[in-house]
Amino acid sequence: MSLINTLFPLGWQHYLLGGLTIGAGVALLYLFNGWVGGMSTVFSSSWSFVFKRSFFQQDRFLVSRHWRLVYALGVVLGALVWRFALAGGEAQDTNVPAWQLLVGGFLVGYGARLGNGCTSGHGICGLGSLQLPSLGAVLTFMATAFLTANLIAWSLA
Amino acid sequence: MNPNLLTPSKALATLIAGALFGFGLSISTMVQPEVVIGFLRFQDWGLMLVMGGAAGLALVAYKGFPRWFAQPLLGGQFLTQPATWDRKTIIGSAIFGVGWGLSGVCPGPAIAALGTGNTDILWALGGIVLGGLAHGLAARD
């Protein structure tokens, strides 16, 4: 028991339940539509509506850009349902400084698109389809994220 | 039928799939950057359960459904998305990790913030939108 408390001081059930719910969404998208639902491609494919540049006009973006936006809209709806059904309707907030969110977000967007996947694309879909390159991607971004988060914590301490 | 065609019924399935995704991110508190940063600082291993649980179900889906069903329930075909191991994947993932460690936010939770009402995270969402643009503009095609 103490090991569980050490690893999961806030409890573990909600993590597993949430992960299984995310997995159910990914599985449902595959079962009904046959589509692999990573989250970061929408940040390239949606720009194809704006820019005629050949990078954005790639076939793989054009064929999926509509459903990826619907998928993202679904994520917003799911979070909205959670907020009003389970979280008392109050808006959430964070203490992470705005500059870290903005700069970090930029690197997340740039890196996920350069690396062709994020925590869901490589971490859930890639690992879920047993792809070694995705395991390499996950280990790589976990390593640099561990380093960055701890460096920030030490430098601010 | 064109396997990518977005029919109304497929749009509904996509919306529900996304809603499950966003609901799961919310109940697992992955929408809270502090929780993600806590994982990255070895204070709480919950993220492993989230990713493991999700990847486990995805494994059943990706390996099982193409064997059990001739095609997706709403038509088309079971598509695959092969990952490649090259310089771009390594460098991109490394950059992604730095940003993730700095902000505690990744693409799914950034989108979900529009639903949880976490307006602070719109900074991160804006950053991701611009990062995706910058990558596309810088890419040699």
Image (tube, rainbow, N blue to C red):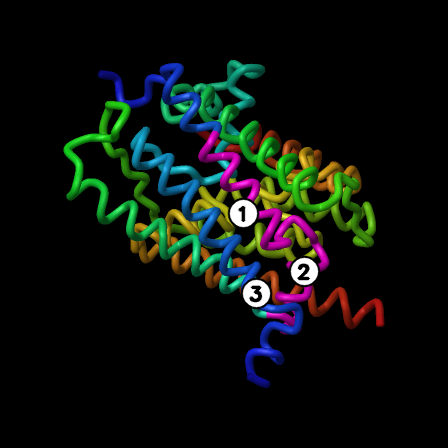
The residue positioned 32% from the left and 57% from the top of the image is A132
Within 10 Å of disc 3 (Cα), the crowding (few <14, some 14-19, many 20+) is: many
The Cα–Cα distance between marks 2 and 3, rounded to whole angstroms, is 9 Å
> Residue B101: x, y in percent?
65, 58
Q: Nearer the viewer, residue B91 or A1?
A: A1
Q: Which residue is mark 2?
A: B35
Q: Secondary structure at mark 2?
A: helix
The Cα–Cα distance between marks 3 and 1, rounded to whole angstroms, is 13 Å
Q: Chain of mark 3?
A: B
- The disc at residue B24 is 1
Q: Amino acid at mark 1?
A: Gly
Left or right: residue B34 versus residue A20 is right
> Residue A122: x, y in percent?
43, 50
The Cα–Cα distance between marks 2 and 1, rounded to whole angstroms, is 15 Å
Circle nearer the N terminus (2, 1)? 1
Q: Work out whether disc 3 and disc 1 sit on a shared chain.
A: yes
The residue positioned 50% from the left and 47% from the top of the image is A118
Magenta extent:
B16-44
Q: Nearer the viewer, mark 3 or mark 1?
A: 1
- The disc at residue B46 is 3
The answer to whether marks 2 and 3 mark residues whose Cβ atoms lie closer than 8 Å is yes
